[in-house]
Image (cartoon, rainbow, N blue to C red):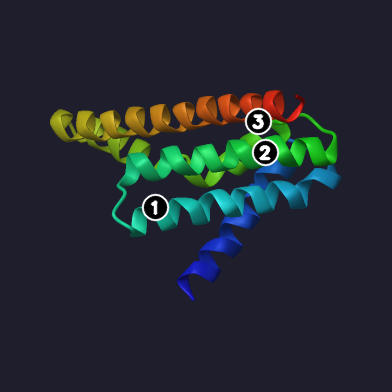
């Protein structure tokens, strides 16, 4: 039941952010499904003891690869699917805790959370980089 609830809310979060940033209507459902797939990938990797950084890396890779193929299918830019689908992965909780502990003058704990935020952001960026590499390799090989 937890997986179904997580899938539903990640789908809704991706669509809601897509509406906020004004992506075309015909891309909203695909964007929601890409975001849901990315979040379920995150949950799966984390459940098999992959760790938070690995889960973010693999799910960003999954979102990036799915976005490339959905963008080709919809004949739209990839960024329309990448950005809203990324919303469930954003480390908002850790960023909030970092600011909170800085405000409470607990700098050691705040820096710890800030390092987590930076590492998660780096893992997401690396996942998108790898997905672009995988997409270019796939289309270069398939065109031959």
Q: Position of residue 133 (x, y in %)?
A: 57, 24
Which mark is drawn over residue 138?
3
Q: Depth-wise, is mark 3 or mark 1 nearer the camera?
A: 3
- One can see residue 78 in this view: yes
Q: Quadrant of residue 128?
A: top right
- Location of residue 3 with respect to 120 vertically, above or below: below
Seen from the viewer's position, the closer of residues 16 and 132 is: 132
- Location of residue 40 with respect to 128 vertically, above or below: below
Q: Depth-wise, is mark 2 or mark 3 nearer the camera?
A: 3
The residue identified by callout 2 is: 67
Q: Which residue appears at 46% of the width and 71% of the height?
A: 2
The residue identified by callout 1 is: 45
The CA distance from mark 3 to mark 1 is 24 Å
- Location of residue 43 with respect to 62 vertically, above or below: below
Q: Secondary structure at mark 3?
A: helix
Seen from the viewer's position, the closer of residues 58 and 139 is: 139
Work out whether mark 3 precedes mark 1 in sequence or the reverse, and give the earlier one.
Answer: 1
- In this rendering, would 11 be left or right of 89? right
């Amino acid at each position: 039941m937890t997986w179904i609830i997580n899938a539903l809310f990640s789908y809704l979060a991706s669509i809601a952010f897509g509406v906020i940033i004004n992506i075309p209507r015909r891309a909203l459902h695909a964007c929601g499904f890409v975001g849901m797939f990315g979040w379920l990938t995150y949950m799966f990797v984390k459940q098999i003891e992959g760790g938070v950084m690995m889960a973010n890396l693999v799910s960003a890779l999954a979102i990036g690869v799915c976005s490339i193929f959905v963008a080709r299918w919809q004949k739209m830019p990839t960024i329309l699917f990448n950005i809203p689908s990324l919303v469930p992965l954003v480390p908002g909780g850790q960023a909030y805790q970092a600011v909170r502990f800085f405000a409470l003058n607990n700098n050691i704990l705040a820096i710890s959370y800030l390092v987590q935020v930076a590492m998660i952001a780096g893992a997401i960026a690396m996942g998108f980089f790898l997905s672009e590499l995988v997409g270019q390799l796939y289309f270069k090989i398939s065109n031959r």
